[in-house]
Amino acid sequence: MQSVTTLLIILLPLVVGFLIRLPKGALVWLDRGLGYLIYVLLFLIGLSLSRVPNLSAQISVISVNVTVLFACIMGANLLILIWLDRRYPWHLSQHQHNKIQNTFSFGGSFKQIACLVMGLICGIYSEICTWFDPESAIKYALIVLIFLVGVQLRSSGISLRQVLLNRRGVIIALIFMFSCMIGGIVFAMIMPGMTLSKGLALSSGYGWYSLSSIILSQVYGPVWGSVAMLNDLAREIFALFFIPVIMRRFPCTAIASGGATSLDFTLPVIQSSGGITAVPVAISFGFIVNLVSPILLVFFSSVSF
């Protein structure tokens, strides 16, 4: 039910936004508003991360498992998806290349990470989270973002069919999920006492750390639930930093690096660094991954082989 709710929260504002078409002159103000909203969202995400219970203690206990799991899964993702980018290149327009180069150099990445860190520090060292709920604020900010993206897509001449039935998004999703399974198999093979089904379960969170931690904690206990949570959390942080860096050369890899968060948390970064044509692919990819993740988490954690 939570996954259905999440999808509805994302898709309904998008559809409503598609009903509105702005003149070209208004798109300048829309782009500027989206830019500011990106930084607000990253700050709120930092506040949300600060509320993860006993995060420092969990990292100290399970750091080896998290490091190895993340290296296996992300390594498989990068190797296979970079091959996809090279074998079937996706060339952004010259206008978008220039925009990425000017706006999302390392300086752009630093500003985004700085907003995230500022939110994390404020959440840890102040009492802001005692009276302010960042998760609710993120939900409402995302609704506004997706609505504005829908307006932007409509005003840019991109159809709803391109968003929901995007061939490239479907291909990226299938290859991404396959590469995650490869990473989970490698992790199960190199870690002592690890079953294949458990490795596959740990690799099926796709960045949805709130979901994976709950499901796997119930099946494997709190230690492995924490491993899943921190591994998926690491994906989100990795994606927020590296999407602007690798988007120009490896756009499919950049979109897929966010996993399930490409539909929500990392969508602002994808939109800003990849341009408007990257958004339908990211939404299509994120839509599929968000649907499949809970199914595979429950399936692999309920079997043993």
Image (cartoon, grey):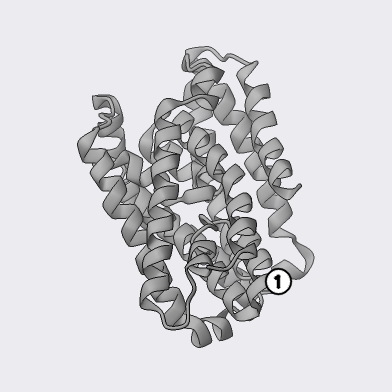
Locate residue 136 relative to residue 162 in the image: left or right. Answer: right
What's the residue at 37%, 40% (across, down)?
273
Q: Does residue 250 sit above or below 197 in this rendering?
A: above
> Percent from the top left, x then y, of residue 248?
27, 40
- The local secondary structure at tag 1 comes to helix
> Percent from the top left, x then y, of residue 204?
52, 57
- Which image quadrant is residue 291 in? top right
Q: Does residue 91 sit above or below 236 in this rendering?
A: above
- Which image quadrant is residue 229 in? bottom right
Locate residue 57 relative to residue 185 in the image: left or right. Answer: right
> Label 1 sits on what residue type?
Gln
Q: Is residue 38 visible?
A: yes
> Percent from the top left, x then y, of residue 91?
25, 29
Q: Does residue 170 sit above or below 56 in this rendering?
A: above
Q: Nearer the viewer, residue 2 or 155?
A: 2
Q: Does residue 302 sit above or below 54 in this rendering?
A: above
Question: What number of labels is visible?
Answer: 1
